[in-house]
Amino acid sequence: MNGYLTKPIDPDSVFEVMLKLIQSKERELPTVEKSSASQQADEIQFPEFREIDVQDGLQRLNYNKGIYSRVLIRFSQNQVNFLEKIQKAHADGDSETVMRMVHSLKGISGNLGAKALFQKTSELHDALLNDMTHFDQLIEAFEPSFTAVLKETTEFAASTE
């Protein structure tokens, strides 16, 4: 192994590792013109979120505002029933689904730049790996951070319609 990266992916780290591993050659680079969709994405304005670090999220997505906007909107759409689904999975004794859901949310929150949610989700993940008997208390401690990010992404999604 010549290098490694941790999640959430930091594009600068990717390029740093790649630069160390790839032999450089001089060559002519193609010119790329911005599409109208790309120009429209550049015009997207993000609100001053309290729970989401927009610059951190944009950095993870190579400053592509269009993709970042879609990630925020999809979070609000796809995670709206997260708490109900994870509680049902736990009630059904499906610890594999519980862990998969928490692990996925951890990655998504890191990519969003939702640092407090990423931290809470990491703590939840680590605690549940060892012991699911305190599930209710762990979810209760996790819920405010999750709900705050869901609220912000839902408001952002509504503002883009």
Image (cartoon, rainbow, N blue to C red):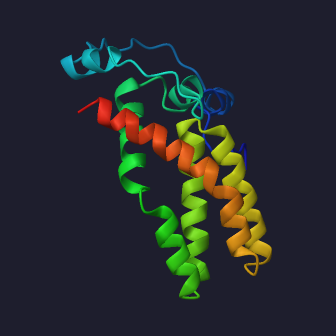
Residue sitting at x 44%, y 14% = 27
Q: Is residue 68 above or below residue 46?
A: below
In the rendering, at what x and y percent does residue 146 appear? 58, 51
Tell me where residue 104 sits by quadrant. Answer: bottom right
| Horizontal relation, residue 68 to residue 120: left or right | left
Can residue 39 be seen here? The reply is: yes
In this view, the residue in front, 83 or 40, is 83
Residue sitting at x 55%, y 56% = 105
Q: Is residue 137 above or below residue 28?
A: below
Q: Quadrant of the C terminus?
A: top left
Q: Is residue 118 above or below residue 161?
A: below
Report the number of numbered marks: 0
Residue sitting at x 76%, y 76% = 134
In this view, the residue in front, 122 or 50, is 50
Q: Is residue 11 above or below residue 86?
A: above
In the rendering, at what x and y percent does residue 107 appear? 58, 51
In the rendering, at what x and y percent does residue 66 appear? 34, 28
In this view, the residue in front, 116 or 108, is 116
| Horizontal relation, residue 113 to residue 73: left or right | right
Furthest-left residue in view? Answer: 36
Residue sitting at x 52%, y 65% = 83
In the rendering, at what x and y percent does residue 40 appear? 25, 17
Can residue 7 be seen here? The reply is: no
